[in-house]
Amino acid sequence: MNDTSILSNESDASTAFSRQSTIFDQIYSANTIINYKRARVRQHVLNHLAPGSSILELNSGTGEDAIFFAQQGHHVHATDISTGMQEVLHQKTVPYRDKISQEICSFTELEELKNKGPFDLIFSNFGGLNCTGELEKVLLSFDALLKRGGKVTLVIIPGFCLWETLLVFKGKFKTAFRRFFSSKGRTAHIEGTYFKCWYYSPSFVIKTLRHSYQVLGIEGLCTIVPPSYIEGFAEKHPRAYQFLKNKEDKLKDKWPWKYMGDYFIISLEKK
């Protein structure tokens, strides 16, 4: 993509999520599987985070994770390109102003951040980084913002999801194969606005950062547990959900399961 296309896509994504910001928590906060995903991601982060750490959060949304980490005693600088999301976050984080700061900034322009840290952790949840075709640029900008020995934890949507592929047996061919031919990006649609997203593998992240970072861990997320867009699964089939959840909790970091989820969680440490 050229610079104009990149800026246009970022603007469209910002518009989409700003439009959704006022109802975002209402839509997702009661979803059992989304809450499972959040708990998994948060525990993964806490496993690699020292007490009282400073966190740079990318695509922070309405601040759900920022508030959680502030409650654990960490300091969070919450960034997002969506003005709507930042406004909701500002309202929600009033009791945590000593722990949470915020800034409107695209993750493709982190060199423009006013608060440059350096930070103990850079964190991005739930595929926010899939909204750019310039992930390599984003990853390479981390060095200047991280302390020596600092960590990176990213939750990214990969190019293959076992559950999604199995939808072919229900005749949902478009959904089943939507990630397979997406090198030029796939169109996403939120609140009447269209923008592109891209899929990335753990190996892409590792290869890009191989010279300065070592891998701490990779987990598949919603590998055995169904993705949250299979609505009502946990509520309609509580015993099956608990069985699948227990299996995923045991196999989340094992091959091949860690590469087959709706998302993967990857953590790296700066050398």
Image (spheres, rainbow, N blue to C red):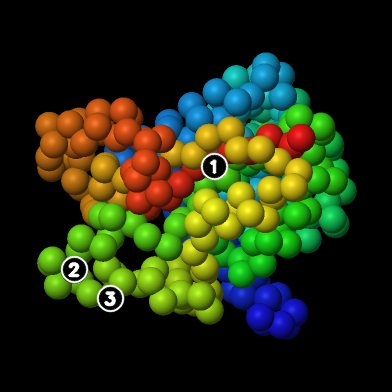
Name which residue type carries label 3.
Answer: Lys
At 55% from the left and 23% from the top, the residue drawn is 47
Disc nearer the start of the sequence (2/1) = 2
- Residue linked to disc 1: 266
Instruction: Pick whichever, 190 or 254, lies toward us.
Output: 254
Instruction: Pick whichever, 192 or 13, lies toward us.
Output: 13
| Tag in front: 3 or 2 | 2
Instruction: Pick whichever, 88 or 200, lies toward us.
Output: 200
Q: Position of residue 193 (x, y in %)?
A: 50, 75
What whole-number distance in Å separates the C-alpha atoms at marks 1 and 3? Answer: 28 Å
Name which residue type carries label 1.
Answer: Ile
Name which residue type carries label 2.
Answer: Val
From the viewer's perspective, tell me whether residue 80 is left or right of residue 174: right
Q: Residue 83, can we see it?
A: no
Residue 250 falls in image quadrant = top left
- Residue linked to disc 3: 174
From the viewer's perspective, tell me whether residue 75 is left or right of residue 177: right
Q: Position of residue 91 (x, y in %)?
A: 62, 41
At 61% from the left and 49% from the top, the residue drawn is 206
At 68% from the left and 61% from the top, the residue drawn is 136
Instruction: Provide the secondary structure element on which disc 3 rests.
Output: helix
145 in relation to 109, above or below: above
Quadrant where the image shows the C terminus: top right
Q: Are marks 1 and 3 in contact (CB under 8 Å)?
A: no
Instruction: Provide the secondary structure element on which disc 2 rests.
Output: helix
From the viewer's perspective, tell me whether residue 243 is left or right of residue 28: left
Disc nearer the start of the sequence (3/2) = 2
Crowding at label 2, few (<14), some or many (≥20) Cα neighbours within 10 Å?
A: some
| Tag in front: 1 or 3 | 1
- Residue linked to disc 2: 168
Instruction: Pick whichever, 132 or 72, lies toward us.
Output: 132
Crowding at label 3, few (<14), some or many (≥20) Cα neighbours within 10 Å?
A: few
